[in-house]
Image: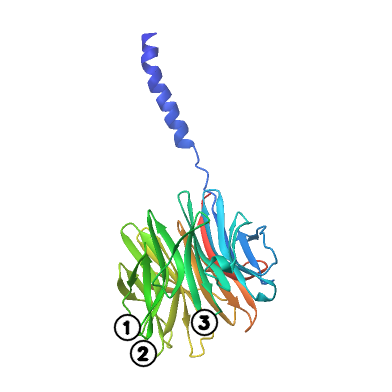
């Protein structure tokens, strides 16, 4: 009996090890969310290429940014009034219209747009820009948890939002002298990024550890746009393989030690027949366009070994089609005119 008692724990350990060894870990469920515009000129959200129910008062407007935090799917955009006389910044939560900020709430703006949304812990941040008219910027504001938080000062235009811990980063440009300088806003302080003396645009920001990456463009004296990444304020020019030296960047994503950026290369002075492109660690890869008249990228996300890019193909001069590329393979999204933002989650 004593021998049995001595051997029993060993036997149980062997059985447990054998069971554990033979267990198969179920694959994670990957969900891909894309926000954009429908072919009926209204905001739209896709989940795994399927159109989601979306609350919209009058079917006019845009869905510009999507972020998934836990069980919440946030979409920032805008809703246009009848006749497009005004536009109100809007936030949807799980497809339900949560916030609808009229122009009067954004410094009496005639048009206001939710350009970016970001979830961090229990907080949700909304970046909103307002205009007196379509060309005159009136205000840039941040909302936190659906309440006005602060005005983004000393920035002439803003387009992207990233939150890391207690730090809030916003990209865009600042008007300095006679040029628009690519700029990064952090907690109220503005950093002007180095350019070639002719200005530029900071389009997206991503923070990884202690490193801050910004993607955008700088302009040359000849009027060209040069695709550029800034890492902690130091500029790196990306290769443009076209004989016409014009390329722009729209989004950036860091995965481990790899830096992915999405952008567009242009091949003639009319800025037509554009080639959607992904750069991984500085090496460019063109995305297929299925014979489209022109195409461009808007957003990028990486999950494991998979790279997702959201964008647009123009099959003709005026016919826009929403596209999602996964590892370089294009999928046309149903009922879509533009894919503006992509977010990938294992939830």
Asked where in the image residue 108 lies, by quadrant, the reply is bottom right
Asked where in the image residue 176 lies, by quadrant, the reply is bottom left
Measuring from the top left, give residue 307's x and y in whole percent: 48, 63
Q: Earlier in the sequence, mark 2 or mark 1?
A: 1
Measuring from the top left, give residue 130's x and y in whole percent: 52, 71
State the SS at label 1.
loop
Say few, some or many: other residues with alpha carbon within 10 Å of mark 3 (under 14 / 14 to 19 / 20 or more). many
- Measure the C-alpha gap from mark 3 to mark 1: 24 Å
Location of residue 17 with respect to 206 vertically, above or below: above
Measuring from the top left, give residue 21's x and y in whole percent: 44, 36
The residue where tag 2 is placed is 221
The residue where tag 1 is placed is 196
The residue depicted at 36 percent of the width and 90 percent of the height is: 221
The residue where tag 3 is placed is 274
The residue depicted at 59 percent of the width and 76 percent of the height is: 313
Q: Earlier in the sequence, mark 3 or mark 1?
A: 1
Residues under numbered marks 2 and 1 in contact, where contact means CB atoms less than 8 Å apart: yes
State the SS at label 3.
loop
State the SS at label 2.
loop
The residue depicted at 70 percent of the width and 66 percent of the height is: 58
Relative horizontal placement of residue 231, taking residue 115 as reference (left or right): left
Residue nearest the observer in this picture, 22 or 287:
287
Residue 150 can be seen, yes or no: yes
Say few, some or many: other residues with alpha carbon within 10 Å of mark 2 (under 14 / 14 to 19 / 20 or more). few
- Measure the C-alpha gap from mark 2 to mark 1: 8 Å
Foreground disc of the pair 3, 2? 2
The residue depicted at 45 percent of the width and 49 percent of the height is: 121
Query: Farthest residue in the top direction?
Result: 1
- Measure the C-alpha gap from mark 3 to mark 2: 22 Å
Residue 306 can be seen, yes or no: no
């Amino acid at each position: 009996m004593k021998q049995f008692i001595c051997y029993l724990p060993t036997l149980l350990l062997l059985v447990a090890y054998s069971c554990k060894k033979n267990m198969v870990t179920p694959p994670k469920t990957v969900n891909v969310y894309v926000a954009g515009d429908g072919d009926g000129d209204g905001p739209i959200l896709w989940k795994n290429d399927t159109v989601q129910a979306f609350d919209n008062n009058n079917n006019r407007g845009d869905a510009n940014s999507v972020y998934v935090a836990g069980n919440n799917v946030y979409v920032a955009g805008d809703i246009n009034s009848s006749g497009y006389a005004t536009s109100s910044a809007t936030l949807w939560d799980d497809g339900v219209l949560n916030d609808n900020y009229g122009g009067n709430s954004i410094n009496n703006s005639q048009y206001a747009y939710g350009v970016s949304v970001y979830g961090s812990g229990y907080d949700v941040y909304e970046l909103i820009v307002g205009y007196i008219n379509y060309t005159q910027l009136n205000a840039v504001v941040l909302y936190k948890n659906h309440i006005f938080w602060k005005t983004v000062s000393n920035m002439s235009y803003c387009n992207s939002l990233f939150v890391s811990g207690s730090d809030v980063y916003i990209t865009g440009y600042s008007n300095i002298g006679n040029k628009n300088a690519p700029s990064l806003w952090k907690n109220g302080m503005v950093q002007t990024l180095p350019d070639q003396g002719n200005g530029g645009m900071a389009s997206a920001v991503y923070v990884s550890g202690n490193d801050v990456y910004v993607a955008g463009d700088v302009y040359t004296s000849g009027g060209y746009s040069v695709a550029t990444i800034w890492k902690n304020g130091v500029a790196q020019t990306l290769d443009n393989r076209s004989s016409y030296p014009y390329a722009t960047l729209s989004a950036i994503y860091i995965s481990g030690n790899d830096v992915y950026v999405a952008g567009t290369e242009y091949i003639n002075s009319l800025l037509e027949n554009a080639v959607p492109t992904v750069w991984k660690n500085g090496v460019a890869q063109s995305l297929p366009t299925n014979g489209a008249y022109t195409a461009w990228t808007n957003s990028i996300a990486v999950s494991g070994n998979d790279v997702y890019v959201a964008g647009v193909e123009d099959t003709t001069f005026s016919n826009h089609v929403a596209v999602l590329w996964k590892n370089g393979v294009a999928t046309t999204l149903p009922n879509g005119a533009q894919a503006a933002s992509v977010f990938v989650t294992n939830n």
